Amino acid sequence: MGKTFIVAELSANHGHKLETALASVRAIAEAGVDAVKIQTYTADTMTLNCNKPDFIVSGGTIWDNTRLYDLYVEAYTPWEWHQAIFNEAKRCGLVCFSTPFDKTAVDFLEDLGNPIMKIASFEITDVNLIRYAASKGKPMIISTGVATMEDIELAINVCHEEGNHDITLLHCVSSYPAPMENINLRTMVDMGDRLGVKVGLSDHTMGADVSIAAVALGAEMIEKHFILDKAIGGPDAAFSMTVNEFKELVTSIRNVEKAIGDVVYPSDTSTIKGRQFSRSLYIAEDMKAGDILTEKNLRSVRPGYGLHPKYLNELLGKKVNRDLEKGERMKLEYVD
């Protein structure tokens, strides 16, 4: 398999300090990650400044009873920081890209040279945003955390209508953190098989287990939230990984990639490491010419330098044509 594209999502984990954001980029690079992702919005491009019940978070989330507007004010990454973050990522050898949440964000990111357009789970129904982002001709990454199959197919079709066929779907469970029993990783595999697109995982679970399993199942991209220090706090801190946790994740993913390898069935037994310890046919007792081979004096044992055990039944009952010592490798030429 190819190298999994590992993305660290910075999101709101900057504590409203540019230097924390830049230090996070450097730490992400240190962890061996491929890319850093940010988010491009303002509270006003995300929602309404409104106190009606519809605009108050509920449903058992970590943000319950918070106004949507206030949540996005807290999580906001200032647009004037973007250039500095992109520059720092480039200096560190990282790909940097962002999630736009409206057309003005798409235009802003285009001016920055943003190389990839990421559509968040809650925006998958915003087909006009998807169409506009896809029209820029950049690779599209679309999260599917709240999507029906109809939503996913519509998003793909909209991209195709804009001539954009470079699409990666990220399986996602939009719970923060996401419970293990709700992940259903087989869905990721099915999306790839059914829709003919690249697939990956946007992982909001605690720890690295689910991401590693996704790579073993064929994920081409893994996205996890990053935080420099849990003490920074913020809306996403609880389910974000630190630099040491990310290092362990990257190491595990790269090891899984090595272990997956290729389909190999060696035809030359001399190339199989350890083949010498397999079983083969050996003379188990001293024999004289004319003695009859039996299960007692001809045995399948380790090591594997003798005759293949498939010949055992064919040889039993036959007379040997020479004297043989215990421990000799059996050969077909020893019988007539």
Image (spheres, rainbow, N blue to C red):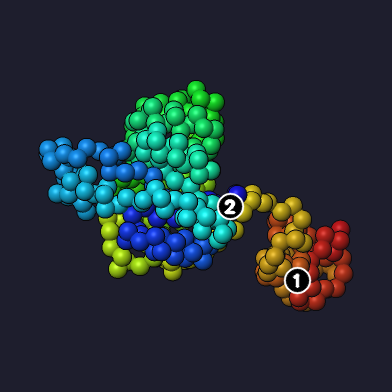
Which residue is outermost to the left? 52
Q: Is residue 177 left or right of residue 322?
A: left
Residue 18: x and y in percent read 39, 60
Residue drawn 18% across and 46% down?
A: 67
Horizontal arrangement in the rendering, residue 159 relative to residue 282 (left or right)? left
Q: Choose top left, top right, bottom left or bottom right for residue 298.
A: bottom right
In the picture, which quadrant includes the C terminus?
A: bottom right
Please report the residue visible at 38 percent of the width from the left and 27 percent of the height from the top.
128
Report the side of 65 relative to 146 (left or right).
left
Residue 50, position as x, y percentages in the image:
16, 39
The type of residue carrying mark 2 is Lys
**Lower position in the chain sequence, tag 2 or tag 1:** 2
Residues at marks 2 and 1 touching, judged by CB atoms closer than 8 Å: no
Residue 62 % position (x, y)? 21, 53
* Residue 59 appears in view: no
Residue furthest top as drawn: 161
- Regarding mark 1 in the picture, which secondary structure is present there? strand
**Residue 208 locus on image (x, y percent):** 41, 60
Q: Which residue is mark 2?
A: 3
Which is more toward the observer, 129 or 320? 129
Graded by Cα atoms within 10 Å as few (under 14), some (14 to 19) or many (20 or more), the crowding at tag 2 reads some
Q: Is residue 167 above or below residue 304?
A: above
Real-space CA distance between mark 2 and mark 1, rounded to the nearest whole angstrom? 50 Å
Pointer 1: what residue?
Answer: 283
